[in-house]
Image (cartoon, helix red, strand yellow):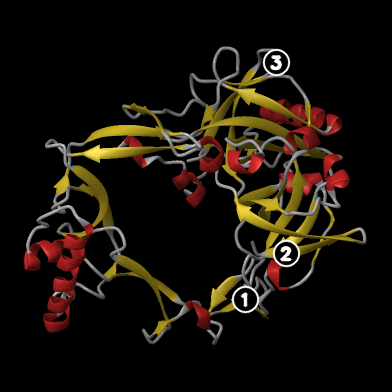
Amino acid sequence: MRTAEFHFGGKNWEAGFSKLEREDVYGWAEVESFDGNGNPCKLATLVDGRHVLPSGSTSLIKLDSSGKSVSTSELVGMNAEGKKVPKEPSVYSGPVHLREGDLDDYLAMGVKSVYVLESEEESPFESDLANGKVLQFRFNYREDYESDDAFLIGNGTHNFIVTGQIADLEYLSQHQMESPVEDEPQTDEEDDLMDFSMF
Amino acid sequence: MSRFIHFVDDQQRDAEVTFSSLNPKPKIRLVLPNGKDPINLRVIKGSAETSADFLCDRLVGPLKSKDDSAELMREIELADYLIKGDPEVDMELHGKYITDSARVYVNPEFKPVFHLKQNELIYNAQRELVEERSPKVVLANISESDMVRWSGRMTPKSELAQKVLFTKKYQVKHINGLTFSFLYDLAKSLDENQALMPVGTGAKGNHPLVMSDGGKPYRAFLEGRVRGKSYCLLMHLTDQELKAPIEKQS
């Protein structure tokens, strides 16, 4: 397994990690669909009310203002101030320096991915993690323009990397209230809550 | 429209308040080398009539036996047709941009099906089929006549953080002065105890929350933070313990 090198408090640890999916822990449910004759059915995309496009029949493309196709590798990262930013390295490309993180930051993070750490060596950070500490670092699986916030956390038997983005929390005062009739745009996250099996 | 959640505290006082998703947006966006935003479009690159299965049936004929070599021979024969005549390309359709589309179920002949029979298969973590049943319709249970009960139990943040994975987060918000006090007091108490409080639905408040119709059930915990006279009340949802898959545990 490919490994990354983690450094904290003068100690270092080489460990590999693999993505943790909920289905690997609890299993999963899937819905089979059949027509009236018992033939299996699949979801497809219908365009213009007449063209049936099976899964994998469409792709996303990016165009410049003249309509020329642009590959993703040609795009560059830009921050909120309109400045181009360099790519940030992958966790595999060099030592990963951990620092003691704040549990409140961990709890304010919108979780994107979870990885289980695996190593033949015992973790030198075990006592820190067992005491409830979280160790923070920047995480990029591959070199990319934006890295994620990441925390190393333990449950007593295994260590995990939890990645995501720490949210900027808004503190509300008495007169800063939510209007009950204000429109709120539907977010992707809310879309994710929809389960097509119900249809 | 704002979305509402109906809370009942441990003294049986209830209030309906709003909530919004805490979903941080990316801080970096990808732009063209000249600094302009690219135009993102979805384009058609195939259709039912140009899929390999459909072309095999139409040009080579139906599969005569279920053996792998028969399927391979059929595909080799199809490859000759593709080289000679490009039947896999629909010049009218391929490359067309899609602006509007619908999702439909289709049968093996790619015909839309409107009356479906569905069967839900449940697999365990060892990938074994454990149950077959009719799909259950799950309805939201957090507002109107449904209530989300505060348990009153305080669990230290660090203890819970090591046990469960909080996969979704919402910020709970007041809608008037009375609900400000209701939420501020709870946030303050949670902040002082550095604790999270489980909340749940049902008469005893021990059932999971379903945030929207057709959604998944989640266990929920409230976390409060206070700065002076302002508060931030977070609702963490979880459907997963922080633990390794079974093969890694052994």
Query: Which residue is drawn at the image coordinates 16% and 44% (left, top)?
Result: B113
Foreground disc of the pair 1, 2: 2
Position in image of residue B25 (x %, y %): 60, 59
Position in image of residue A72 (x %, y %): 49, 77
Displayed quadrant of residue B76: bottom left
Displayed quadrant of residue B169: top right
| Within-10-Å neighbours for mark 2: few <14, some 14–19, many 20+ | some
Query: Which residue is drawn at the image coordinates 62% and 31% (left, top)?
Result: B220
Chain where mark 3 sits: B
Dot 1 amino acid type: Met
Dot 3 amino acid type: Asp
- Image: B42 above or below A173: below
Position in image of residue A179 (x %, y %): 57, 40
- Image: B33 above or below B163: below
- Image: B238 above or below B149: below
Chain where mark 2 sits: A
Q: Is residue A99 left or right of residue B249?
A: right
* SS label for mark 3: loop
Mark 1 vs mark 2, CA separation in Å: 28 Å
Q: Which residue is mark 3?
A: B10
Position in image of residue A45 (x %, y %): 26, 56
- Image: B186 above or below A17: above
Foreground disc of the pair 3, 2: 2
* SS label for mark 2: strand
Residue A4 is marked as: 2
Residues at circles 3 and 2 in contact by the CB criterion of under 8 Å: no
Q: Which residue is mark 1?
A: A78
Residue A159 visible somewhere in the drawing? yes
Mark 3 vs mark 2, CA separation in Å: 48 Å
Q: How many marks?
A: 3
Which residue is at the front of the view, B15 or B92? B92
Which residue is at the front of the view, B200 or B134? B134
